[in-house]
Image (cartoon, helix red, strand yellow):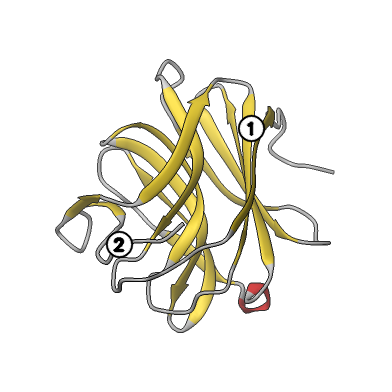
Amino acid sequence: MECAEGSDFWADTHYGFRRHSGHALLVPFQAGESMEVDFLVDYDDLYDQAGVLVRADEETWVKAGVEISDGLPQIGAVATLPRSDWSCAPVPQWAGRVVTLRVSRIGDALIFRARSAGQSWQLVRLAPFPPDATAFAGLYAAAPERAGLVVTFTRMALGPGDAELHLA
């Protein structure tokens, strides 16, 4: 997936702008399902990002992925209901590796998990999401600061959702 310069998903908070111009490939996403996407973290410019997106509309969406911030890959999430928030944590060991992001839609929540090949799942975010919303989920990428970001996705798959927050 090649990203246009200025592409992003963001609404208002701190930066004062609204962007719904990121690139995504989405399919219908029902309660009780999960969506997994695999992609190569081979990018390193500020705010370059890729991962999984769940979207109901332009004011109701949540994304989780690996984004470059402070010079490092960061695992993070943004929930927009209707204003965006942002959380992130450094994962420098994921640079140059394939990462899997998984989101499960359970009741009124989205459970986001991530791992790199051979590692255990780690919880990224438990986010609220309207249980009655018609939703779509899939892979996304964005390049807020530059043109030419190309992200290599290797898999996108629907499956059963994780019913439990804590995996053994």
Q: Kindly indicate the quadrant of the structure image that contains residue 83.
A: top left
Return the residue at label 1.
34
What crowding class fits label 1: few (fewer than 14 Cα within 10 Å), some (14-19), or many (20 or more)?
many
Identified by mark 1, the residue type is: Ser
Determine if residue 77 is in view. Answer: yes
User: Decide: marks 2, 1 in contact (CB < 8 A)?
Assistant: no
Residue drawn where x is 15% and y is 57% of the image: 17
Whether residue 165 is situated above or below residue 27 in the rendered picture = below
Q: How far across and down, in percent of the image, does residue 35 sit?
A: 61, 36
Identified by mark 2, the residue type is: Ala
Q: Kindly indicate the quadrant of the structure image that contains residue 3.
A: bottom left
Near-viewer residue (88 or 115)? 115
Near-viewer residue (158 or 17)? 158
Horizontal side of 19 relative to 1 (left or right) equals left
Q: Earlier in the sequence, mark 2 or mark 1?
A: 2
Residue drawn where x is 40% and y is 20% of the image: 133
What crowding class fits label 2: few (fewer than 14 Cα within 10 Å), some (14-19), or many (20 or more)?
many
Whether residue 105 is situated above or below residue 6 in the rendered picture = above
Q: How far across and down, in percent of the image, does residue 79 sit?
A: 39, 45
Q: How far across and down, in percent of the image, does residue 86 sit?
A: 39, 58
- 3D distance between C-alphas at marks 2 and 1: 28 Å
Return the residue at label 2.
4
Q: How far across and down, in percent of the image, does residue 77 sit?
A: 47, 54
Q: Nearer the viewer, mark 2 or mark 1?
A: 2
Horizontal side of 73 relative to 4 (left or right) equals right
Residue drawn where x is 62% and y is 76% of the image: 95
Q: Residue furthest bottom?
A: 71
What SS does tag 1 mark?
Answer: strand
Residue drawn where x is 54% and y is 20% of the image: 30
